[in-house]
Amino acid sequence: MKMLVSPRLSELDSCPYLEGHMEQHEFFFAGELALDELDYLLQHGWRKFGQFVFRPTCPNCTKCIPLRVDLSSFKATKNQRKFLKKHQHLQIKFTPLIFRKRHYEIYRKHGIERFQNSIDASIIDNEQLFKETFYRFTGTQLLSEIFEDGKLIAFGILEQSESALSSVYFSYDPEYEKMSLGHLGALSEILYAKSLGLEYYYLGYWVEENKYMRYKSRYTPHQLYDWKEQTWKLADNSSKG
């Protein structure tokens, strides 16, 4: 691991997921990561955005729970198979990480619509910050893209470790909201990871009280990370499918 900045704590700030809560995280910057090193970090609740590696250390709160899908046992449900068939006219591609202007256009449109009341608009309007956050290559990133008739309408940024695929960020053009592209993206990435013979698909942090994160529990069987015991446990509802 090539660590650019040693681990430190962020300043307290308003939580973007739960109103009235404060958030804080431990973080460092890594210029290079071996696949097994990224594996270790993911297994212990860390997230990685480009060179930025972090995990929550919020005072008196552990509601951001890492969630991962067990790929060896995953099988698409009847409804998920119908959903995939309905969208089979779309083209889904997985490629090495590369920045496209269209990525930022989608990110900005999606961000303004979804986060306009919970995030500083100057962050969404900063293309350079977007590129620095997600596109500083460290050897483990790749890209998923969804096209309709040749037009890019959604994209996802992923991290691949030795045994897993981790969803870093997914965004879609709000004009196509009725197509449930977030659901399509997650399903496609799960199936892609499974085709690679990987063990897990990480969906990042799940906050039960946040309505925008409820979709993450759709994919079963999934495991939740216990911060106190530092172990992964099968979710109570995960066996129901």
Image (tube, grey):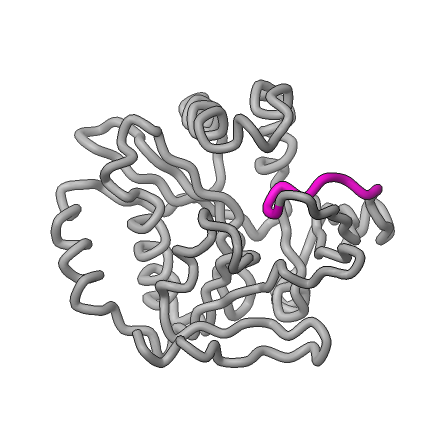
Majority secondary structure of the magenta segment?
Answer: loop
Residue 197 magenta-drawn? no
Image quarter of the N terminus: bottom right
Say which residue appears at 47% left-offset and 52% top-offset. 213
- Decide: is 12 above or below 186: above
Image quarter of the C terminus: bottom left
- Residue toward you, 143 or 115: 115
Chain part drawn in magenta: 11-18
Say which residue appears at 69% left-offset and 71% top-offset. 227
Q: Find residue 199 and report its horizontal and vertical position in percent.
A: 45, 74
- Residue toward you, 33 or 200: 200
Residue 44 horizontal side relative to residue 165, left or right:
right
Q: Find residue 143 and report its horizontal and vertical position in percent.
A: 44, 44
Q: Find residue 172 and report its horizontal and vertical position in percent.
A: 37, 35
Residue 148 horizontal side relative to residue 202, left or right:
left
- Residue toward you, 155 or 184: 184
Say which residue appears at 34% left-offset and 59% top-offset. 192
Residue 92 horizontal side relative to residue 209, left or right:
left
Residue 13 magenta-drawn? yes
- Decide: is 15 above or below 231: above
